[in-house]
């Protein structure tokens, strides 16, 4: 991610967009390059403007945020997409993460916290509203998925990277930790997500954390 991250806002409330615009104008590490008031407009602008990060409302008239997210990912949009919404519904959180969102923030958060989370997202970290962390962890547990069998499909390097993602490290920090390039990390992340059948590193991180908890809680044979 460059020193100044290019941001696109997608929200059908002009007043909220204006408030975010004022907030981001105070942060030199963020540059607002586009704003959209509908899902259809957002899909077009994401392709034209090539932002680094997209803040996407969920409950929009017409094409909602989830459909917009799916359309962007299906169209090859690689920007980090963070939902910014009023909905803390469990099903909404899980659906967005599984559809490829890189984070989920609530509009009632303090402006400074929203700004901190957006900046964290630009560096590849998970952007999750604090009170949703446990909800997400609980909802993404997959007791029917054979964890050991799934992990066995990963290479040793992919497994290393998955563990570091679960620890909250960005691609840049993972590259530094393993002494490899950012580009190599991105390739490994892409491959491990495909093997795990997941759309986002957030989902993979939560799944891995739950996997570790399950292993720790499992009775040891004597």
Image (spheres, rainbow, N blue to C red):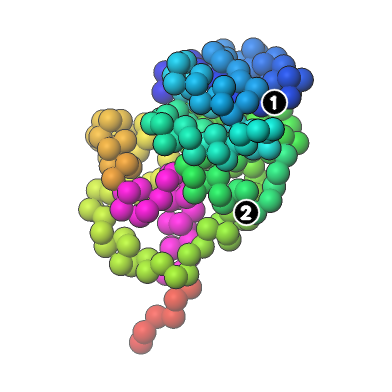
Question: Where 86 falls versus 203 (above or below)?
Answer: above
Q: Position of residue 126 (x, y in %)?
A: 51, 40
Q: Name the mark nearer the viewer: 1 or 2.
A: 1
Overall secondary structure of the magenta section: helix
Q: Residue at x 47, y 69 (%)?
A: 143
The circle on residue 12 is 1
- Pick the front one: 87 or 135: 87
Q: Position of residue 166 (x, y in %)?
A: 44, 49
State the CA–CA distance, disc 1 to disc 2: 22 Å
Q: Position of residue 6 (x, y in %)?
A: 50, 17
Q: Decide whether residue 198 is among the magenta residues.
A: yes
The image quadrant of residue 32 is top right
Residue on which the image places disc 2: 91
What range of the chain is rendered magenta?
192-216
Instruction: State whether residue 145 appears in this view.
Output: yes
Please state, as top left, top right, bottom left or bottom right, where the C terminus lies in the image.
Answer: bottom left
- Left or right of 125? Residue 176 is left
- Pick the front one: 168 or 193: 193
Question: Where 106 falls versus 53 (above or below)?
Answer: below
């Amino acid at each position: 991610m460059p020193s100044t991250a290019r941001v696109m806002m997608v929200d059908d409330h002009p007043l909220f967009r204006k408030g975010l615009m004022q907030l981001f104008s105070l942060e030199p590490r963020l540059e607002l390059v586009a704003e959209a008031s509908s899902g259809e407009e957002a899909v077009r602008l994401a392709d034209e403007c090539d932002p680094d990060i997209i803040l996407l409302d969920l409950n929009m008239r017409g094409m909602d945020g989830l459909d917009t997210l799916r359309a962007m990912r299906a169209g090859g949009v690689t920007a980090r997409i963070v939902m910014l919404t009023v909905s803390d519904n469990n099903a909404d959180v899980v659906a967005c993460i599984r559809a490829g969102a890189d984070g989920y923030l609530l509009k009632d958060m303090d402006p400074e916290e929203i700004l901190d989370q957006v900046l964290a997202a630009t560096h590849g970290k998970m952007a999750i509203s604090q009170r949703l962390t446990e909800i997400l962890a609980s909802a993404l547990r997959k007791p029917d998925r054979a964890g050991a069998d799934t992990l066995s499909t990963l290479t040793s390097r992919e497994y290393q990277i998955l563990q570091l993602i679960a620890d909250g490290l960005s691609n840049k920090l993972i590259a530094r930790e393993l002494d490899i390039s950012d580009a190599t990390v991105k390739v490994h992340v892409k491959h491990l997500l495909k093997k795990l059948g997941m759309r986002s590193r957030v989902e993979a991180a939560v799944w891995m954390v739950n996997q570790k908890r399950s292993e720790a809680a499992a009775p040891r044979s004597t």
